[in-house]
Image: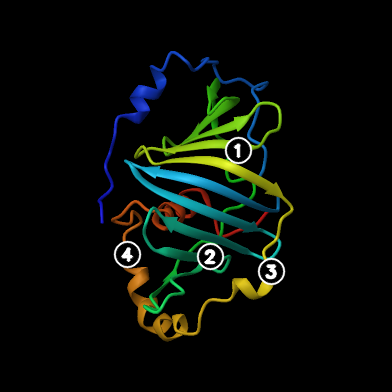
Amino acid sequence: MKPFLVCLFTILFFFNPHVTSISSKSTDPTPAPWPLQFHAVLFMNNSGNLQKLDLWYDWPNGRNFNIIQNQLGKLKYDLEWDNGTSYIYTLDSSQECRVLHLSVGILRPNWMDGATYLGQQYVDGFLCNVWTKVDFIWYYEDVVTKRPVHWVFYTGYTAHVMTFEVGAVLEDPKWQAPVYCFKEEALEEEEEEKMPVLESVVTVSSVGKLIRRVFNTPTKL
């Protein structure tokens, strides 16, 4: 388990000669809101620790699902609901499960509203508009299709979007957490409220929870 590492990405980014810097003005492009429902496959890189992430986003039904395959490691499931409850579990014989209770729900489709426009940059072979928000995330969106291409967190943790299927919906039965998660829920409810805002490890799950706390409010659109 690795602690958060504060890196120099912010400084390096602003001195990157490949970014076309443009002062912020009213005519600057803004990030496209996320589709209300989509499925994306992402490859995540945390200082050389690789993960494949299946992301199922379903705003109308108030749910978000991260299926996380660690390289040559465990397959984990991170099921998030808009009431703030998350179930992080395995489906193997270990029957591991952790239940979290947050004060905010899943990310809103317009969670990048208010981001600062930085200009354009080629990344992964795509010309992208680039924004940053609260010095926490750098968000790259394809200029032509408006699809997300790449994210960089302030720790250097990166996401590369491999596929992006607008309108794709996971079947309802697959959104059900296993029964052994509900045995843990009562035990962990009080402890989660005592946790600091910054979790102690950088993983898909912990970064996802942190994004929700930084960018979400209890109110919906």
| Mark before the other along the chain sequence, 3 or 4 | 3
**Disc 3 marks which amino acid?**
Glu
**Disc 4 marks which amino acid?**
Met
Give percent across and percent down for residue 128. 59, 26
Q: In this view, does 11 lie above or below 191?
A: above
Q: Answer whether labels 2 and 3 touch (C-beta < 8 Å).
A: no
Q: Nearer the viewer, residue 143 or 85?
A: 143
- Tell me the residue at 43%/53% (across/down): 204
Q: Residue lying farthest front?
A: 72
- Tell me the residue at 53%/76% (across/down): 177
Give percent across and percent down for residue 56. 61, 57
Category of crowding for the residue at label 2, using alpha-carbon neighbours closer than 10 angstroms: few (below 14), some (14–19), many (at least 20):
many
- Tell me the residue at 65%/75% (across/down): 173
Q: Can you tell which mark lies on residue 171?
A: 3
Describe the element under mark 4 as helix, strand or loop: loop
Q: Can you tell which mark lies on residue 195?
A: 4
Of badges 1 and 2, the one in the foreground is 1
In whole angstroms, how far apart are the C-alphas of marks 3 and 1?
A: 24 Å
In whole angstroms, how far apart are the C-alphas of marks 3 and 4?
A: 33 Å
Instruction: Identify residue for label 1.
Output: 148
Instruction: Identify residue for label 2.
Output: 80
Q: Is residue 60 left or right of residue 183?
A: right
| Mark before the other along the chain sequence, 2 or 3 | 2
